[in-house]
Image: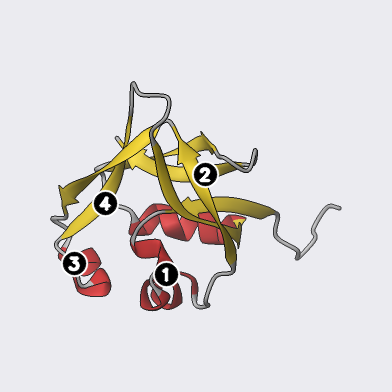
Amino acid sequence: MRGSLVSEIKLLFSYGTLQNRLVQLETFGRELVGNEDQLLGYKLEMVKIGDQQVVALSGKTHHPIAVASQDKSDFVSGVIFEITSEELTQSDLYEVSDYKRVMGAFKSGQKAWVYVQA
């Protein structure tokens, strides 16, 4: 419907700081609702965050980062959240340049956006 005020619902997977209530409130203005799932074909490492605003908001100098794995049995646990298109844009602004957004495959069979190693 053209000109609709209803935003398209998107799915966003978080395995890190976007699961934090305070980060959600600051980034989206609300708490997110989601379901636990597993991102397939990735493993977690840690990355040092240089953006002091992100460090101040998350309270952490190092954040987890999903790195593509050669081992098909590797997976990353987290939560798939339902967000709006506008909130997806806001999450892009929150993430630092070490991350890129890709469409991921999940144990549940769903497809969702996820931030992984750039």
Whichever of callouts 1 and 3 sits on the residue coming sooner in the sequence is 1
What whole-number distance in Å separates the C-alpha atoms at marks 1 and 3?
16 Å
Q: Answer above or below: position of 45 versus 2.
A: above
Amino acid at dot 2: Trp
The first of marks 4 and 1 along the sequence is 1
Q: Residues within 10 Å of mark 3 (few under 14, many from 20)?
A: few
Residue of label 1: 27
- Residue displayed at 51% across by 36% down: 104
Secondary structure of the residue carrying numbered label 4: strand
Residue 2 is left or right of residue 83, and the answer is right
Q: Which residue is under mark 2?
A: 113
Figure label count: 4
- Gap between marks 1 and 2 measured at Cα: 17 Å
Q: Residue at x 47, y 41 (%)?
A: 39
Dot 1: within a 10 Å radius of its alpha carbon, few (fewer than 14), some, or many (20 or more) residues?
some
* Residue 7 located left or right of residue 13: right
Task: Name the amino acid type tagged 4.
Answer: Pro
Residue at the disc numbered 3? 60
Measuring from the top left, give residue 57's x and y in whole percent: 26, 73
Coloring scheme used: secondary structure
Q: Mark on residue 64?
A: 4
- Tag 3 near tag 4, CB within 8 Å: no
Q: Is residue 60 left or right of residue 115?
A: left
* Secondary structure beneath label 1: helix
